[in-house]
């Protein structure tokens, strides 16, 4: 009979390592309740200001809950992670971290904003700008093969810091098992994020989550990298007033993404009277980067899409 387990909250780890001691052992079909810390491991709080970035201890970034050992999990098989429930806790933050982000050269200085999420429905970016809270875990993964202290960021074929914002309640994530027992871990909760997490931070927050785990044997399903299935529309909470798009066109996808985002930051700043750095943070909360075209004679098109429904008086 399937069981529900409570993951301890006093134990975290900051690297991928095949020798991390499992904090839970479960069977296929079991559910685990997690309460994860925000990504700085409580080095920031609701009252924090930009000055806190200078003292950030990077060795404590990405505290993950786990690992969870799944009985019967063998390399080559697949671990299905069904997302039953997610709740953002009462506060969160977004920051520009020097040297990081898609427009690091445009925004070289540190900048931090914190947000009260006690509304439960919206991030109040400004009095007339409300972004729906759509929580997900930025990091979910099994232990990489032969991992011996690998950093949590970047992601890999094992999953990890994949930041797929579509992994909300009702979605299922499929992970290729690389070590015996799978050794699943999670954390890095986000209250909202646009595709791309363009300023390198989403709306980072502590998170409650309920996940159900199911083993799929190697003979039934083998995958090379994470896959997922969602329950329906990709942007259900912002589909009612259309989108504004900017593009970047050229032979390099990274440069195209930067050009599209730069134009979007300018558009938001000019149209909605926001400082450019706040427009950059807003884009990280809700602007989606898309590869619109990639097959036409080496000239690629990247689009940045802004949901107009977040603005009280949408500009048509």
Image (cartoon, rainbow, N blue to C red):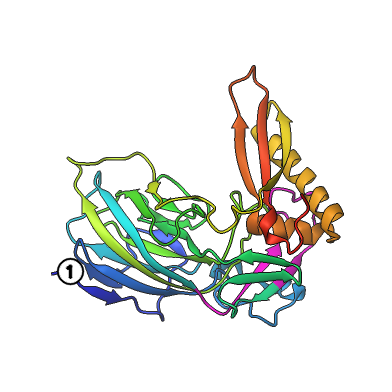
Name which quarter of the figure residue 67 lies in. bottom left
Magenta highlight range: 88-113
Of residues 38 and 23, the one drawn nearer to the viewer in this rendering? 38
- Locate residue 178 relative to residue 225 in the image: left or right: left
- Locate residue 198 relative to residue 145 in the image: left or right: right
- Locate residue 309 relative to residue 165 in the image: left or right: right
Any part of residue 66 in sight? yes
Of residues 49 and 210, the one drawn nearer to the viewer in this rendering? 210
For residue 54, above or below residue 253 = below
The crowding category of the residue bearing disc 1, from other C-alpha atoms within 10 Å (few below 14, some 14 to 19, many at least 20), is few
For residue 89, above or below residue 180 = below
Secondary element type, mark 1: loop
Residue 13 lies within the magenta run? no
Q: Tell me which residue sits at (40%, 79%) in the image.
A: 9
The N terminus sits in image quarter: bottom left
Name which quarter of the figure residue 183 lies in. bottom left
Q: Tell me which residue sits at (60%, 56%) in the image.
A: 238
Of residues 159 and 308, the one drawn nearer to the viewer in this rendering? 308
- x and y percentages locating residue 151 in the rendered image: 49, 57
Q: Tell me which residue sits at (18%, 61%) in the image.
A: 71
Name which quarter of the figure residue 81 lies in. bottom left
For the stretch drawn in magenta, the main secondary structure is loop
Residue 112 lies within the magenta run? yes
Q: Which residue is mark 1?
A: 2
For residue 164, above or below residue 299 = below
Q: Tell me which residue sits at (66%, 80%) in the image.
A: 46
Most extreme residue toward the left is: 1
- x and y percentages locating residue 91 in the rendered image: 60, 77
């Amino acid at each position: 009979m399937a069981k529900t387990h409570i993951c301890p909250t006093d134990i975290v780890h900051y690297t991928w390592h095949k020798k991390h001691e499992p904090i839970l052992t479960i069977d296929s079909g079991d559910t685990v309740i997690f309460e994860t810390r925000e990504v700085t491991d409580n080095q920031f709080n609701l009252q924090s200001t930009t000055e806190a970035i200078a003292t950030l201890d990077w060795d404590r970034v990405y505290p993950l809950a786990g690992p969870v050992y799944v009985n019967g999990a063998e390399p080559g098989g697949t671990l299905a992670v069904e997302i039953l429930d997610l709740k953002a806790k009462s506060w969160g933050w977004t920051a520009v971290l020097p040297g990081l982000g898609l427009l690091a050269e445009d925004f070289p200085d540190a900048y931090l904003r914190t947000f009260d999420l006690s509304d439960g429905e919206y991030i109040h970016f400004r009095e007339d700008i409300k972004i729906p809270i759509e929580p997900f875990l930025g990091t979910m993964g099994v232990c990489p093969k032969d991992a011996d202290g690998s950093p949590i960021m970047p992601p890999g074929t094992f999953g990890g810091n994949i930041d797929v914002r579509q992994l909300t309640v009702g979605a299922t994530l499929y992970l290729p098992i690389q070590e015996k027992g799978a050794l699943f871990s999670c954390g890095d909760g986000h209250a909202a994020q646009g595709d791309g997490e363009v300023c390198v931070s989403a709306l980072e927050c502590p998170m409650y989550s309920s996940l159900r785990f199911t083993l799929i044997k190697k003979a039934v399903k083998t995958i090379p990298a994470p896959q997922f299935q969602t329950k329906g529309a990709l942007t259900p909470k912002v589909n009612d007033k259309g989108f504004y798009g900017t593009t970047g066109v050229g032979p390099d996808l990274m440069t195209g993404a930067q050009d599209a985002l730069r134009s979007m930051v300018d558009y938001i700043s000019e149209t909605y009277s926001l400082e450019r750095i706040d427009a950059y943070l807003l884009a990280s909360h809700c602007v989606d980067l898309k590869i619109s075209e990639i097959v036409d004679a080496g000239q690629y098109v990247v689009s940045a899409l802004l949901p107009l429904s977040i603005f009280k008086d949408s500009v048509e």
